[in-house]
Amino acid sequence: MSLSTAAGSQDGILLRTHCAGVATLTLNRPQQMNALSMDLLDALQSALNDVAADPAIRVVVIAANGKAFCPGHDLKEMLANRTRAFIGSLFDKCCDVMMSITRMPQPVIARVHGIATAAGCQLVGACDLAVASTDARFATSGVNFGLFCATPGVSVSRNVSRKQAMEMLLTGEFIDAATALQWGLINRVASPDQLDRAVSEVCALLVSKPSAVLAAGKKFFYRQSEMDMASAYKLACGVITDNMLGQHALEGVTAFVEKRKPEWHDN
């Protein structure tokens, strides 16, 4: 069964589909290359909240229509509303969206084509996984316009090495998909005609796993990444002990011993 809806205060600026446990949120401002306007951020936040609370959704894909994934914030909107109240609210709202992606229980995959720059690159970095077309290019290009990409730098620097992050942030130059893969900003690369298939393959892998285990694992991963090693190991011991004594590990280990496929029951 597939459900399609449009979300947002403007007609269809964010599209939603749900099929076989996978929710796809599609940025739909192709004439603006899917720039993150205030309205689009509101629509995306609302959709993420809905999806996070829906146990029927196992995986989330963030995609985009048109020639590009996302060039970042809508600069025309920012110039037209150049007040501390508006600009501060815009950046706060964007950061809330990024944190919602991290905090939601489902794995989130970025499906990237064309350019992903500034806050668009931030969005890729915020997703748990990213699959990109060979034509994709990435940059934190604000410095070229007199604006250091501070907020994009948060997610980018948590994906690539410090030197690589600084190169992107200080030069504003593009990197191609092959370089983004090598640096760790994305997970997989596919030709444009195979991009949807590559994303579907990752979705199928994730849907086949017990969603409760993935949710607990995702929550643990982001918590431990900000800890010192001793604290991370302490947290990990508690998480894996609870996991091992739970029903999913019992079924998974029993199935392995009995040489059969496990039968997951998440609900």
Image: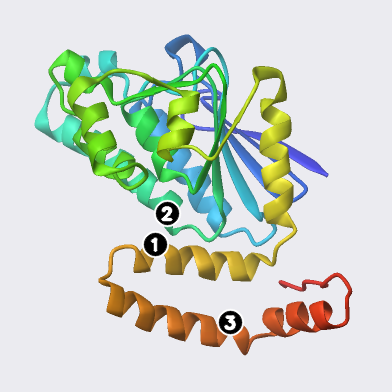
**Residue drawn 30% across the image and 43% down it:** 161
Mark 2 lies on residue: 102
Give me the disc on residue 54: none
Q: Residue furthest top?
A: 31
Evaluate if marks 2 and 1 touch, with contact meaning CB atoms under 8 Å apart. Answer: yes
Q: Earlier in the sequence, mark 3 or mark 2?
A: 2
| 2 lies above or below 138 | below
Quarter of the image with the C terminus is bottom right
Mark 3 lies on residue: 243
Question: What's the CA distance linking mark 1 and mark 3?
Answer: 17 Å
Question: What's the CA distance linking mark 2 and mark 1?
Answer: 8 Å
Label 2 Cα neighbours within 10 Å, binned few <14 / some 14-19 / many ≥20: some
| 248 lies above or below 167 | below
Mark 1 lies on residue: 222
Where is residue 30? Give x, y as percent: 51, 14
Where is residue 211? Give x, y as percent: 65, 65
Q: Nearer the viewer, mark 2 or mark 1?
A: 1
**Residue drawn 57% across the image and 56% down it:** 106
Q: What residue type is disc 2 on?
A: Thr
Quarter of the image with the N terminus is top right
Where is residue 133? Give x, y as percent: 58, 23
Q: Is residue 208 visible?
A: yes
